[in-house]
């Protein structure tokens, strides 16, 4: 049986992420996959950036909040084929001092080649982290693993030889408690589980992750062929009313050149309203018009203007969980052909 596991967690401040991992034995080409949909209620613009590396530190591409630098990362891939995503937990204490979650993520991208390196970094920083996060990591062996991390301890959750989902850390971490009242993690867990369990019969791919998982929106879960019309409550889907960014990281397998095969597909705003672009660890250029630099600009600004066609802002920004699915479908008629063309241009034989 093939390997896969999903994690999704919700914070108590209305900020959440959904993260997931598939090891190489579950994918079409033996290369592991990570995804993350990042939610924020403040609409802080997302950006992509690069760290060029040094004689002792890896180069890497990473997603970051606009205005931040290589000392923080929300997800990324480095030139050794090590990839990482994370989600902030609602039920782990952020005790400790030192590195925050995004700072720890950046430190891992700079220093880690393997999952074992990540374990050693965790041991080295016990008591020196201000972290309450869940990390998904992959390396160039095609392997992947998940970790629950607080300031003083960590727990590794192996990717078992089965398909499984879970909504919070209460089952695993000794410091974890129940999910927050009213948490929608269980619904999104079920949604992610459905999408992964009903993926292509030949195996999961970065194309499927981009087109169907991070861009998941108002669909009928029981019948994927039927798109409900009119208003649809998006809180339980993966690209929803407060999703600010989505990314898919494809790693590599033994024998690959990580700088060629590893890629991060990044949507710099709500993925169902925009296009994910491919970025590699050492290709440190992006068209400037794609990048936000300030609110309302770049891809994030363009998608935000589309967002206002889909959601009703009469009651305040990000208060409306109901999307106009007819408008979503119209937007997809423009974005899907462009997304297809990007995959065909980069990897014509892999879709």
Image: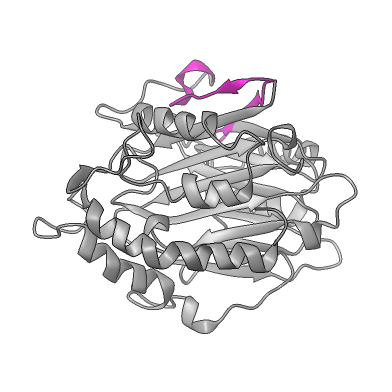
Q: Is residue 290 left or right of residue 242?
A: right
| 112 sits to left or right of 256 | left
Residue at 79%, 62% (x, y): give it.
260
Residue 284, quarter of the rendered image: bottom right
- Indicate the position of residue 203 as horizontal and vertical percent values: 66, 36
* Residue 149 lies in the magenta stretch: yes
Task: In the displayed orientation, state which residue is furthest to the bottom.
Answer: 288
Which residue is painted at 31% across and 52% down in the image? 242
The magenta stretch is 148-172
**Which residue reaches farthest right?**
255
**On the picture, is 216 further left or further right than 133?**
left
Indicate the quadrant containing the N terminus: top left, top right, bottom left or bottom right: top right
- Asked whether 177 falls inside the magenta stretch, the response is no
Q: Colour scheme of this structure image?
A: one colour
Query: Horizontal and vertical percent for residue 136?
Result: 61, 39
> From what the image shows, is residue 199 above or below residue 99?
above
The one of 264 and 75 positioned closer to us in this rendering: 264
State the residue in front, 127 or 65: 65
**Observer-nearest residue: 102 or 322?**
322
Question: How many marks are shown on the rendered structure?
Answer: 0
- In the image, residue 90 sits, relative to residue 64, either above or below, namely above
Residue 69 seen from this side: no
Residue at the spot 37% in from the left edge and 26% down from the top edge: 186
Direction left: furthest residue: 314
Q: Residue at x 21, y 43 (%)?
A: 232
Q: How far from the left and from the top, in percent, is residue 289? A: 47, 82
User: Can residue 253 be seen?
Assistant: yes
Q: Position of residue 279 (x, y in %)?
A: 64, 66
């Amino acid at each position: 049986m093939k390997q896969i596991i999903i994690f999704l967690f919700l914070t108590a401040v209305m900020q959440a992420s959904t993260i997931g991992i598939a090891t190489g034995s579950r994918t079409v080409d033996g290369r592991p996959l990570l995804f993350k949909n990042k939610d924020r209620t403040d609409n802080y613009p997302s950006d992509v950036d690069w760290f060029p590396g040094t004689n002792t530190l890896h180069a890497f591409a990473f997603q970051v909040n606009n205005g931040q630098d290589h000392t923080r990362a929300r997800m990324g891939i480095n030139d050794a084929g090590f990839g990482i995503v994370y989600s902030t937990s609602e039920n782990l204490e952020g005790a400790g001092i030192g590195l925050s979650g995004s700072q720890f993520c950046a430190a891992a991208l700079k220093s880690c080649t393997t999952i074992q390196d990540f374990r050693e970094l965790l041991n080295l920083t016990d008591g020196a982290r201000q972290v309450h996060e869940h990390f998904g990591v992959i390396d160039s062996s095609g392997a992947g693993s998940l970790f629950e991390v607080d300031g003083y301890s960590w727990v590794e959750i192996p990717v078992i030889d089965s398909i499984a989902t879970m909504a919070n850390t209460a089952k695993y971490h000794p410091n974890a408690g129940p999910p927050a009242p009213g948490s929608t993690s269980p619904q999104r867990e079920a949604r992610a589980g459905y999408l992964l369990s009903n993926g292509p019969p030949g195996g999961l791919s970065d194309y499927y992750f981009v087109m169907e998982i991070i861009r998941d929106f108002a669909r009928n879960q029981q019948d994927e062929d039927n798109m409900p019309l009119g208003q649809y409550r998006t809180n339980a889907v993966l690209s929803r009313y407060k999703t600010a960014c989505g990314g898919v990281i494809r790693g590599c397998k033994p024998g690959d050149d990580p700088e060629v095969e590893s890629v991060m597909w990044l949507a710099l705003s709500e993925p169902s309203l925009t296009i994910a672009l491919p970025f590699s660890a050492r290709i440190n250029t992006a068209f400037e018009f794609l990048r936000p630099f300030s609110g309302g600009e770049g891809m994030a600004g363009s998608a935000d203007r589309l967002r206002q066609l889909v959601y009703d802002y009469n009651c305040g920004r990000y208060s409306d969980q109901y999307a106009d699915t007819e408008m979503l479908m119209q937007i997809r008629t423009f974005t899907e052909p462009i997304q297809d063309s990007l995959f065909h241009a980069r990897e014509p034989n892999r879709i």
